[in-house]
Image (cartoon, grey):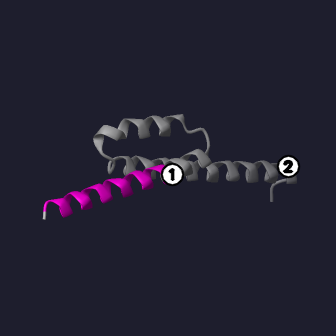
Amino acid sequence: MPSPKIQEIINELDNLMNRERKYIELVATVEYLLNLIEPSKREKFKEALYDAETVEDVYELIKAIKLQLGMQGARRYLLTLEGQ
């Protein structure tokens, strides 16, 4: 069994790795969602991703992407109604 000091360092490293893993997973999710956004608006969202400094920033970006995708879906739906 490692000494208490070594165990504390191991625990801190483990916590850090978990936070980094979560951030990487979030970024991968956002990059996937970016491909669903209209090309004309995609660059702004990419800039926001690169400017994100915290996990909370990435969560806010995901919320914005969800709104954008909802608007795109609504627009497509309305266009199909007009075409009928």
Query: Residue 31: image x %, image y %?
Result: 41, 46
65, 5: nearer the viewer: 65
Numbered badge on residue 5: 2
Residue found at x 67% / y 48%: 16
Residue found at x 60% / y 38%: 53
Crowdedness near tag 2: few (<14), some (14–19) or many (≥20) residues, C-alpha within 10 Å: few
14, 26: nearer the viewer: 26
User: First in sequence: mark 2 or mark 1?
Assistant: 2
Q: Which portion, as a residue range, is magenta?
A: 63-83
Can you tell which quarter of the image residue 47 is in? top left
User: Which residue is labeled 1 in the image?
Assistant: 26
Can you tell which quarter of the image residue 1 is in? bottom right
Q: Give left or right: position of 41 versus 60.
A: left
Q: How many marks?
A: 2
Query: Residue 41: image x %, image y %?
Result: 35, 40
Q: Secondary structure at mark 2?
A: helix
- Looking at the rendered structure, the kind of residue marked 2 is Lys
Quarter of the picture containing the C terminus is bottom left
Crowdedness near tag 1: few (<14), some (14–19) or many (≥20) residues, C-alpha within 10 Å: some
40, 36: nearer the viewer: 40
